[in-house]
Amino acid sequence: MINKNEFNDLLLNLKKQVEERIDKTHEHIHHSGEPVSKSFDEQAAGRGNDEVVYTLDSLARTELADIEDAIKRIENNEYGICNKCGVEIEMERLKTIPYTRTCKSCASD
């Protein structure tokens, strides 16, 4: 049986960690105080780094939305139920990906 309080605490912890990652990527993206390099190669490398940071930011925001959705599912007593087939999601899967919406079988389809 799923201990919803335990998973709620886990999700709140994850949410805090992801929000901290988003804050760090936001700081990097808005590094307006740094001087622009005169070297084209350094500018190009910096742009490449910025693209990586934008991607990390986007992934973190998606993860945050998934976590917030899982917290809502706990509040609505819908947590731990596969949204595709309606069976209970395996405990091992929930421990690994606590914000998952699908059971192992449906995730592999």
Image (spheres, rainbow, N blue to C red):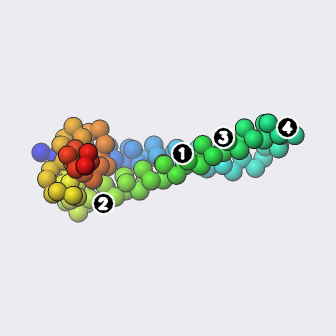
In the image, residue 65 lies at what x, y percent?
41, 56
- Pair 2/1: label in front: 1
Relative to 53, 76 lies left or right: left
Residue at mark 1: 56
| Disc 1 + disc 3, Cβ < 8 Å | no
- Amino acid type at image mark 4: Ser
Question: What separation in Å lies between label 2 and label 1 (alpha carbons)?
Answer: 24 Å
In the image, residue 10 lies at what x, y percent?
32, 43
- Amino acid type at image mark 1: Leu
Q: Residues within 10 Å of mark 2 (few under 14, many from 20)?
A: some
Q: Quadrant of the N terminus?
A: top left
Q: Quadrant of residue 53?
A: top right
Residue at the spot 82% in from the left edge and 44% down from the top edge: 36
Residue at mark 3: 49
- Amino acid type at image mark 2: Lys
Residue at mark 2: 72
- Amino acid type at image mark 3: Asn
- Whether residue 8 appears in this view of the structure is no
Question: What separation in Å lies between label 1 and label 3 (alpha carbons)?
Answer: 11 Å
Question: What separation in Å lies between label 4 and label 2 (alpha carbons)?
Answer: 49 Å
The disc, 1 or 4, on the residue closer to the chain's N-terminal end is 4
The disc, 4 or 3, on the residue closer to the chain's N-terminal end is 4
| Disc 2 + disc 1, Cβ < 8 Å | no
- Report the label total: 4
Question: What separation in Å lies between label 4 and label 3 (alpha carbons)?
Answer: 15 Å
The disc, 2 or 3, on the residue closer to the chain's N-terminal end is 3
Residue at mark 4: 39
